[in-house]
Amino acid sequence: MKLSFSSLTKWLQHKSFGRHKTSTQEALIFRTRPEKKAPSLVQFQYLPRIIPQKEKGFFWAALVLFVIAAPIALGQWYFRSTDIVADVGGSYTEGLVGAPQHINPLLASLSDVDSDLASLVFSGLFTYNEQQELIPDLVTNYVISEDELTYTFFLRHGVQWHDSTKKEPQELDVDDVIFTIQAIQDTQYQSPLQSSLRGVVVAKVDETTFTLTLTEPFAPFLSSLTFGILPEHLWFNVPAQNVRLTELNVTPVGTGPFRFDQLTKDKAGNVKSFDLMRNEDYYEQQPYLDELHFIFYPDSITAVEALKSRKIEGLGFIPSTEKEGIEKKNADVTFASIRVPQYTAIFFNQKQSDVLKNDDVRMALAYAVNRDVIVDQVLQGEGEAIYTPILPGYVGHNADVEKYELNTEEAVRILEEDGWEFPEVEDVADDVPVEDVVEGEDGAVEEDTSVETNEDIFRPREKDGVKLEFTVATVDLPEYQSTLALLQDQWQAIGAKVNVDIYSPEDIQTGIIKDRDYEALLFGQIVGSDPDPYPFWHSSQQSHPGLALSIFRGPEIDTLLEEARQTSDAEERRLRYLHFQNNIAKEVPAIFLYNPLYSYGVHQKIQGINRQQYITAPSDRFSGITSWYIETQRDWK
């Protein structure tokens, strides 16, 4: 029965007054004006006085039950009628190994730290979504001519630069795009993106329309247009030769989902922290997070310790060997292991080493490498052995290429047939003393037992007085150091001595890779979503700012890469890539080791992360950053 004030009144009248004369108190409750169907709140205060004693217990129990049940029922109804959704607010602090130098789309690809930050601040003509599909970003549409040479693009309207204000609005236009493309093409800028736009002519149609014209068809051209666009009004007066020196590189202005807020530096001028804030004028879905804080560490060991001690809430890269230790000390961190189009290899610089210029030496070194041991021991199984610069699953991958799988006996045979022999012990007796003597406290002569004898020192093979010895440069990462330790043992087993030089992430880029100042280099290369190996293997890219790290002569390789770029026929392109990999295997300009999984950690308070299984570059872990959230609210269904 539906309960109402009128029915309650009738019930009370029946129960209390059907058998008793109406009292003054009763009248105060039931004698209401005709237009009123229920007693007033004032009248209700007399209710306990008129209820018979034996029915008061029932009344109060019913009232208590109502008071308890009503909120519960109301709450259940509310929760059934609403959903938990993301709300604006909160901040996230992440640690990065290295330090920002050029948060500038023209230069950022040389550094993971710069790339991470640039991806949050800048927007490109195209981008990759969370499914790693190429989609328009700053353009709304495009048209390709029938000859596949001219691309016409239409820009979004109303995109605001971060420094835009109501008094001085700054809106992105075609001039910004033209300025950025021409800057990339300018050799003085020394942009590593230069090769992808070589020969491309950019022309303005109107304020929101422009064309790019190629000299020849290039099927993956659109995938090369994901770089961020620079604001011409800030950069136009920066001389090309000073582009690496301007403060704009660390106080960037873009059109991305987050804008620069502040940074801190130490006394030496090194950036120690970097803060971004939500861009409330972002043209797409605005981020939920208010702030992003980044703290920089000199090496991964220090960064991992910071994560363990909860000084940071996430880490941009986590070595697989550190996961267990992090889980024990910081259970709030959740991990994601995803595939990245990256390979780690030993790149040979034949201009710097006569030993590595020898074809037989490089082939023997390749046969001596045990990739499976490296993947199991260094990567804890989180990766796969690889043998070519085009990864499995990509167009043109050559599964049948010569792999030089582990064969120590074959490696030794090749070296011996080429004349590399171990020296006799007496041949090196003058170079390494059998024992040294030192003067004791009393002046007596004593043997110095700390000095190694001839038998304790490894002597590499020699040929014509040249030792089978070279130095490998690498970056200060546990993964690379562990890999080199295994390679040293594997190569020593065939008579080769390997020295190791370790550099910080900044020094290896500016002092070693830039000048190609190494005999061999252990390094990782991210090849992007398209398999085009031209930027990494064409001879024109072997000097800065090119990305080719193996220094050698390969005219046939150059021809195949050029032809693959010129054809729009997918099958023709695939065949040229197959031949390219066969030539690489024949020349052995590098030894390809493994494709690692990229692991990063984020505090469990961060919701909305799409832990996809594949990304194009480490910075793509932020591809869904606008969906990350901490705060929540309830919305009606």
Image (cartoon, rainbow, N blue to C red):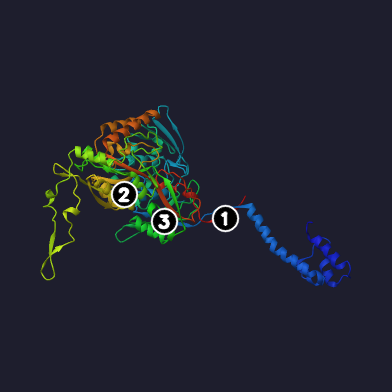
Q: Is residue 61 above or below residue 244?
A: below
Please tell me whether mark 2 or mark 1 is closer to you in this view: 2
CB contact under 8 Å: marks 2 and 3: no
Q: Which residue is mark 1?
A: 633
> Which amino acid does the dot numbered 3 rest on?
Glu
Above or below, 90 relative to 547:
below
Which element type, helix, strand or loop, lies under badge 1?
Answer: strand
Is 273 situated left or right of 503 in this image? Answer: right
Task: Say if residue 306 shows up in the picture.
Answer: yes
Q: Quadrant of residue 451?
A: bottom left
Amino acid type, mark 2: Thr
Residue at which label 3 appears: 324
Rounded to the nearest angstrom, the CA distance separating label 2 from label 1 is 48 Å
Asked which quadrant contains residue 634, the reply is bottom right
Q: Is residue 265 above or below residue 198?
A: below
Residue 483 x/y as whole percent: 31, 49
Looking at the image, which residue sits at the far top?
Answer: 147
Determine whether, in the image, residue 290 is placed left or right of residue 181.
right
Q: Horizontally, is 633 left or right of 245 in the view?
A: right
Q: Residues within 10 Å of mark 2 (few under 14, many from 20)?
A: many
